[in-house]
């Protein structure tokens, strides 16, 4: 027997109480749920476009300074950064992108527990990324004075322009790290909705948008890792 969604979403044809995703009704200004979902995804893509423009400015600054100081850029990357730390964080973010896709697939298959499990793994990966970034990179650099611009106090007699490299490093990775932090809160919100039964085969639009946001965060890091750690 199949349940029939009522206008109020209280019960189906078999008398059982409907899950929120089963009883979901689109807003009155939408013709149907499909139109609402497409509009929501379009809005998310427009937002993500502004995010790409934001980081494009960092990449342009990177390209200019790398062209002006190629040898110093190469030396500073190897002197101040560890590719092993960057590689570990890259692997973790790639795993998190995979698990967020699995969470969306679980919603399509109406597997509530698996939605929660995959989102939890995604959030743990995000937390791991921030712990590594702050604990193994930011705090030691702050203690040594390896800071951007005029705050740079670390003495390296052969690193005349190191403060420029570190300025690009700090502004780009800190901005990305802030996006990871936002992602943790957004994914936690998605977990709360999943626990209340808001995601299922009939409705998982906001979960898809959370996944889109997280993929952009991961893709940006895929560019930052080789540009900063492997130059």
Image: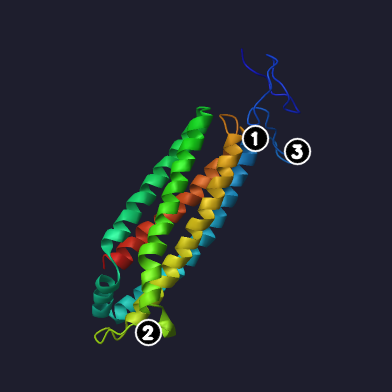
Contact flag, marks 1 and 3 (Cβ < 8 Å):
no
Q: Where is residue 143 in the image (x, y as percent from the top left)?
A: 38, 75
Tell me if residue 5 comes above or below residue 104 in the rendering.
Answer: above
The residue beneath circle 3 is: 28
Q: Where is residue 180 in the image (x, y as percent from the top left)?
A: 48, 56
**Mark number for residue 7?**
none
Q: Residues within 10 Å of mark 3 (few under 14, many from 20)?
A: few
Q: Residues within 10 Å of mark 2 (few under 14, many from 20)?
A: some
**Residue drawn at (56%, 50%) of the image:** 186
Q: Position of residue 61 (x, y in %)?
A: 40, 75
User: Disc 3 versus disc 2: distance between alpha carbons?
Assistant: 60 Å
The residue beneath circle 2 is: 153
Q: Helix or strand or loop: what does disc 2 sit on? A: loop
Front of the two marks 3 and 2: 2
- Tell which circle, 2 or 1, labels the residue nearer the N-terminal end: 1
The residue beneath circle 1 is: 33
Q: In which quarter of the image is the C terminus?
A: bottom left
User: Disc 1 versus disc 3: distance between alpha carbons?
Assistant: 10 Å
Q: In which quarter of the image is residue 196?
A: top right
**Residue drawn at (68%, 20%) of the image:** 4
Which is nearer the eye, 144 or 86? 144
Q: Quadrant of the N terminus?
A: top right
- Tell which circle, 1 or 3, labels the residue nearer the N-terminal end: 3
Q: In which quarter of the image is residue 24?
A: top right
């Amino acid at each position: 027997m199949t349940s029939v969604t009522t206008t109020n979403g209280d019960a189906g044809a078999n008398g059982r109480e409907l899950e929120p995703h089963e009883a979901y009704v689109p807003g009155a200004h939408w013709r149907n749920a499909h139109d609402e979902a497409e509009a929501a995804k379009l809005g998310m893509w427009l937002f993500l476009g502004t995010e790409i423009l934001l980081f494009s400015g960092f990449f342009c600054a990177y390209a200019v300074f790398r062209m002006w100081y190629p040898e110093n850029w190469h030396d500073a990357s190897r002197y101040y950064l560890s590719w092993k730390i960057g590689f570990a964080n890259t692997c973790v973010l790639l795993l998190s992108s995979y698990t967020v896709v699995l969470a969306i697939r679980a919603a399509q298959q109406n597997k509530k527990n698996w939605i929660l499990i995959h989102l939890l793994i995604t959030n743990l990966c995000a937390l791991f990324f921030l712990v590594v970034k702050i604990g193994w990179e930011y705090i030691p650099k702050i203690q040594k004075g390896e800071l951007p611009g005029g705050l740079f106090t670390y003495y390296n007699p052969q690193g005349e322009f190191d403060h420029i490299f570190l300025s690009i490093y700090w502004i780009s990775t800190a901005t990305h790290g802030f996006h990871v932090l936002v992602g943790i809160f957004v994914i936690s919100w998605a977990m709360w909705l999943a626990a209340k039964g808001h995601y299922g085969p009939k409705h998982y639009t906001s979960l898809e948008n959370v996944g889109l946001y997280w993929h952009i965060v991961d893709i940006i890091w895929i560019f930052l890792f080789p540009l900063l750690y492997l130059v």
